[in-house]
Amino acid sequence: MLKNKSLYIKLSLTTGIFFSLCSYAKAAEINKEIDDIHKTWNIKFNQEVNYDAETKREITIKDSNGNILETEINLKDGKTITVSSPKEGYKVGEIYTLNIGGKVRSKELKLIKAPRSYTFKIKEKISNPDTVDYKHKEIVNTTIDTTINSIEKKGIETEWESIALLKAGRIIPDTYIKKIEGDLKNSNGVLAQPTDYERMILGLPAAKADPTNVAGYNLLEKVYNNEDLESQGINAYVYGLIALDSKSYDVPDSVMWTRKKLVEAILDNRTKDKGWDFAGIKADPDMTGMALIALAPYKNEAEVKKAIDEGVKKLSDLQTENAAFSCYDLENCESICQVIMGLCANGIDPTEDRFVKNKKTMIDALMTFKTADGGFSHIRKSKKDSKATEQAVLALQAYKNLKENKSVKIY
């Protein structure tokens, strides 16, 4: 504890409880886990604070990537400064650091003895789903269950199916990871495209496998040091970033494709009409939805936030009169799913007014692709399609999690 008239601080975590920040927090140390994504922090000083522009600059909250969040710094009373959450709230699962710089002064212009930092993690808020009501709740829950049951019955065949089962809380059989290991061994660790590695990484958490050592191969390295990533374009950039962020994997600064470079590549590949497309010409809902998923963890960066906002507006403009989405002038299940996931990843309700067309929501539109055998079709009145089915489960689960205040991390 600082003595005499030196300026020191305490951080108020809950009403009437104070924790002194008299030493530096270690980088890996979590001082507190909270489930309030809109938490306002109270910084209590032992003297009246000289509240000016410099003091406000010295108090910041950063995410795990070092990005400074947009928060409001206010003087509550002479000795207490409040730090609000970002408007969209903190992200569940993310670790943040509240920093109080060394240039904070008292009214008597005494400097704080040393900078302070406090690390906190946002945990999932546990709520009883039975007490949470929302639009389409019954049909969403029933559809997830019946669709997942149909996937389990036939057996897992793709990475996307394994992810869908994991998100729905089902157990992944050991045969799945054995299949992946077998595929890698048979190909000597060489897959056809960058997205093949990225897709494989996304499916590994379901099997509780380590992507740095699958049958002796480091799949992460095959993404962030892949010389062919650029040749596959926006699709590889998007899923490369999603794969690396899926479990916040470590990425060395010296690699060919850092997170920062992937974000920049995604932003550089926007279409002129403020969306994304595989060919980079005219925004299409699928790639725009995918890009929104990839960029969601970086929305506190001004340039990224602007791109996300413009992409969301473009999606509303692209929506058909049936509240669906088209690719090559054909309304289809997968396009709707990617948009739902892209919106939910950014905390946006896909059933809100700007996405309601002729009194129909995207969930209404998605349900028109349901098949009698517990799946979804690519186009209406067609047979069950595996890709449409697995994406529908992921989209519905993302919507369910958003409405039930659970983590909406898609992958």
Image (cartoon, rainbow, N blue to C red):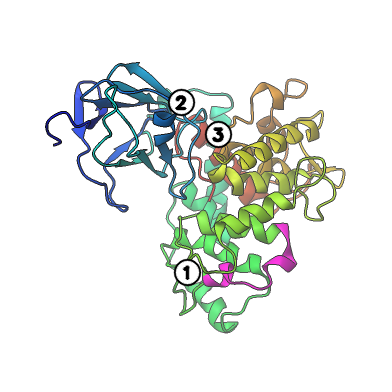
Residue that carries the numbered disc 3 in the rendered image: 347
Q: Indicate the position of residue 409 as horizontal and vertical percent values.
A: 51, 45
Q: Quadrant of residue 115?
A: top left
Label placed on residue 397: none
Name the amino acid type tagged 3. Gly
Q: Is residue 223 a member of the stretch shown in magenta?
A: yes
Q: Is residue 181 above or below residue 122?
A: below
SS under mark 3: loop
* Residues rendered magenta in the picture: 221-234
Q: What's the residue at 57%, 72% (across, down)? A: 222
Q: CA distance from mark 2 to mark 1?
A: 47 Å
Query: Which quadrant would residue 320 be assigned to in this image?
Result: top right
Magenta span includes 58: no
Say if mark 2 contacts mark 1, CB within 8 Å.
Answer: no
The secondary element bearing badge 1 is classed as helix
> Disc 3 vs disc 2: which is toward the camera?
2
Q: Residue furthest top?
A: 77
Residue under the image location 58 percent in, 31 percent down: 139
303 relative position to 43: left or right? right
Mark 3 packing: few (<14 Cα in 10 Å), some, or many (20+)? Answer: many
Mark 2 vs mark 1: which is more N-terminal? 2
Q: Nearer the viewer, mark 2 or mark 1?
A: 2
In the image, what residue type sits under mark 1? Ile
Per the rendering, the mark at residue 177 is 1
Q: Which disc number belongs to residue 72?
A: 2
| Nearest to N terminus: mark 3 or mark 1 | 1
Q: Going 68% across and 71% down the picture, which residue do you hit?
A: 193
Q: Nearer the viewer, mark 3 or mark 1?
A: 3
Q: Which of the two discs, 3 and 2, labels the residue nearer the N terminus?
A: 2
